[in-house]
Amino acid sequence: MTEAPVLAEAGTHSGTSRRSTGSGRPLWAGVAVLAAVLVAAPVVAVLLDGVGGLGGGSLPRGIGDMVLTTVLLMLGVGTGTLLVGGGLAWLVTAYRFPLRDVLVWLLVLPLAMPAYILGFVLLSVFDVAGPVQGLLRSLFGADLWLPEVRSLPGAVLVMSLTLYPYVYLLARAALVEQSPGTYDAARTLGATRGRALVRVLLPLARPSLAAGLSLVMMETLTDFATVQYFNVTTVSVGVYLVWKGSFDFQSATQLAVLVLLFAVAVLTGERLLRGRARFHQKGARGRGLQPRRLTGARAWAATAACTAALAAGFVVPVVQLLVWAVGQAVADPASLQDPRLVSYLVNSLTVATVAAVACAALSTTVAHAVRMRGGPVVSFAAQLTTFGYAVPGAVVGIGVLLVFAHADTLLEAAGVPGGTGLLVTGSVLGILYAYVIRFLAPAYQAVDASFAKISPTITWSALSLGAPPRRVLARVHAPMVRPGVAVALVLVAIDAVKELPIVLMLRPFGFTTVSVWVYELARENFWEKAALPALVIVAAAVVPVFVLFRQARGAGTPGDEARAAAAPVPATGGEER
């Protein structure tokens, strides 16, 4: 029991502990700083170019409408997810009813349904040419008024159904982890369950609710395809439309700066929602919030509410996609052998695999650099590598183009004819660079969580025995963080398969992925043809949700259950994450 401290003390005398706390080899600090520069460069390029263009005094046309639409969409989706996700979290935590033990985890499945897939499924059923409106008009007359489906409320509904699990998971974890003493004290003083919820539990759960809402807002801000299906033009969509439609790069960068301001506003709002209060809780003996068994109609009403959310967000669209895919296969058996499906799937898997390996390797290196070098500069650089996840894909695409345009200028000035040419922007290298920027954050979080479980005395012991940092990484750290690296590979691969705007903006001629193919087919109302590739995307997105489900079902105690519910969840609700 005393060997590790002795080795650590020996390391202090030999000077090796200084390598692990901030005065060691500068090479590892340089790696962390270089990774931060690579991630920040496109964002800085967008800011400089966009702010510099404001000197002309002209702003993109329609910017006021785009800003208003973006604000209304974010507020609508935030309210919807808070009501649905928070309400379901309270229902499954505070009450027992039929199928509750199964539904409590199945309610996470809508995370695996990208919003743009649910969007075109809903449009195919409820739009003007869909079966629902056709049936209603045949029964009540052709002049029957029906609300417009392709509208802002339609987009709010679809995105709320796919994004509510963010609020649901974090709210439920906060309710389960409440200290028994606080709730018991409120009940002892005569508060009803409802009053204890409003006056005690919800204030203590405010940080979790704020975190869930911030995730929802970021997903809403970065959405690209869903809003276009519903004829909703947000600022993020405006970046792509202005650049692709009019080739006005200056206006596109100005809109990109506005998107970044929205992202900063979301993060600032999350801090403000938490307030200046602190939310520490002390453990105490007590029963805490015990689920109350519902009976009769109320019990089945609770089951119906949970089932309706699950069905609308996952089950019904999957069934509809299966019906379309089977119908298309029966009507045209050759469609199953469509060479485009195999080719586009290979493209998706190739770039996803390369991006996943690159992000996992870079994350492991940066986390190891923090452990070896330490210090505020390296720590700040490591945190900066996670910034790209909060930047919409359209902004990252614009930034990558700007970075390589400036690189071409510098290389040509240095005497290199043509600069980088089409080596990057004319191949998938540009896509891979943008993927690393976007998805390095989930990879680093997964790997860093594994590094946090390694006792510093283990690192100090290896250093005190004369092992250089490179050998410590290969023989000590890498084997111990293998589970975190595996999680990082899965998360990045799934996100990369679903990514849409980056590929649309940076893909070379003739290069298409499954997500782009689904987007283009659905935009042209070829629902049946889009069904099979859409099912492939959903099946891929189910993987991390299934891992979460198994962890949760395997939890044996209430504390384990809470920790499983509070585990990081990959953002699989839309094409961006």
Image (cartoon, rainbow, N blue to C red):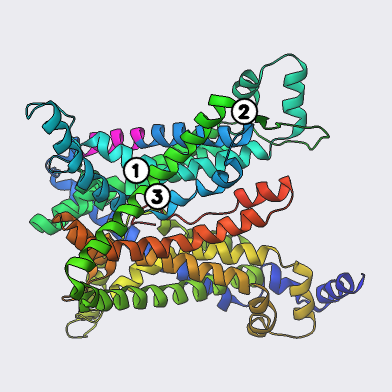
Helix, strand or loop under label 1: helix
Q: Is residue 447 left or right of residue 142?
A: right
Horizontally, is 551 left or right of 158 in the view? right
Which residue is found at the position 71% from the left and 32% from the top? 290
Mark 1 Cα within 10 Å, few/some/many (few <14, many 20+)?
A: many
Q: What secondary structure characterizes most of the magenta part?
A: helix
Residue 426 is at least partly visible in this image: no
Q: Which mark is residue 294?
A: 2
Q: Which of the two discs, 1 and 2, labels the residue nearer the N terminus?
A: 1
Q: Is residue 34 above or below residue 263?
A: below
Q: CA gap, disc 3 to disc 2? A: 25 Å
User: Residue 41: image x %, image y %?
Assistant: 36, 64
Amino acid found under the numbered disc labelled 2: Leu
- How far apart marks 1 and 2 lie (CA) works out to 31 Å
Q: Report x, y in % for residue 288.
A: 74, 31
Badge 3 marks a residue whose secondary structure is: helix
Q: Position of residue 273 (x, y in %)?
A: 51, 32
Residue named by callout 3: 315
Pick the residue in front: 278 or 158: 158
Residue marked by disc 1: 159
- Indicate left or right for 426 with 35 as reference: left
- Quarter-of-image position of residue 19: bottom right
Q: Residue at x 21, y 40 (%)?
A: 126
Disc 3 residue crowd, few under 14, some 14–19, many 20+, Cα 10 Å: some
Q: Residue furthest top?
A: 190
Residue drawn at x 12%, y 32% is: 137
Residue kind at label 1, given as amino acid type: Met
Q: Say if mark 3 contacts mark 2, CB within 8 Å.
A: no
**Span of residues in magenta:** 66-76
Quadrant where the C terminus is found in the figure? bottom left
In the picture provided, is 474 more to the left or to the right than 309?
right
